[in-house]
Amino acid sequence: MSTETTASVSTHILDTSVGKPAEGVAISLSARTGLDGEWAALGGSATDADGRCKDLPALPEGTTHVRLDFETETYFSTKHRSEKQAAEAQQDAPRVRDSGAFFPEVTITFAVNPGEHYHVPLLLNPFGYSVYRGS
């Protein structure tokens, strides 16, 4: 597959509530050709210890739009369950909230051009997120 006729995508996630990479967030990738095209699920992966997802599937030739789906609820519920257990082990520790994320999933859809690389970082916390086109 020629990189001149296809776009490529990468992402990473920073948990801004703790200032660290978000490890273990499942991400799925879909693509379509044209505004009226059907979304095709291409597969997915999960973030590593550095919050990076280095093995997303390649985009098919002719892709014009990409969708990244981040499963944030599992990440936050697992993370906060661990924090709660650690806090309960310490008598004077502050209480950790029981709920997971306000946004159980984050979906980012963006347009792509053939031959370009798109790095889309997600800055995440339990009550908000932001995303931008990185380099």
Image: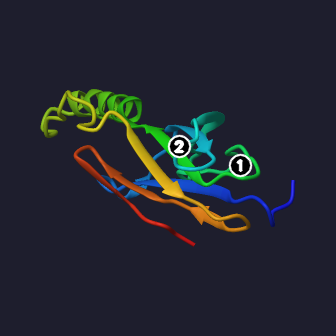
Q: Nearer the viewer, mark 1 or mark 2?
A: 2
Relative to the observer, which residue lies in front, 25 or 106? 106
Q: Residue 59 carries which label?
A: 1
Residue 97, image quadrant: top left
**Sequence-wise, which precedes: disc 1 or disc 2?**
2
Across and down, in percent, residue 94 comes to: 13, 40
| Horizontal relation, residue 119 to residue 109: left or right | right
Across and down, in percent, residue 83 comes to: 30, 35
Q: Mark 2 points at which residue?
A: 36
Across and down, in percent, residue 69 comes to: 48, 40
Q: Which residue of the protein is positioned furthest toward the front in this rendering?
A: 36
Type of the residue with mark 2 = Asp
Instruction: Provide the secondary structure element on which disc 2 rests.
Output: loop
Instruction: Provide the secondary structure element on which disc 1 rests.
Output: loop
> Which residue sits at x=26%, y=43%?
126
Q: Which mark is residue 123?
A: none
Q: Which residue of the protein is positioned furthest toward the bottom in this rendering?
A: 135
Total labels drawn: 2
Across and down, in percent, residue 41 comes to: 62, 33
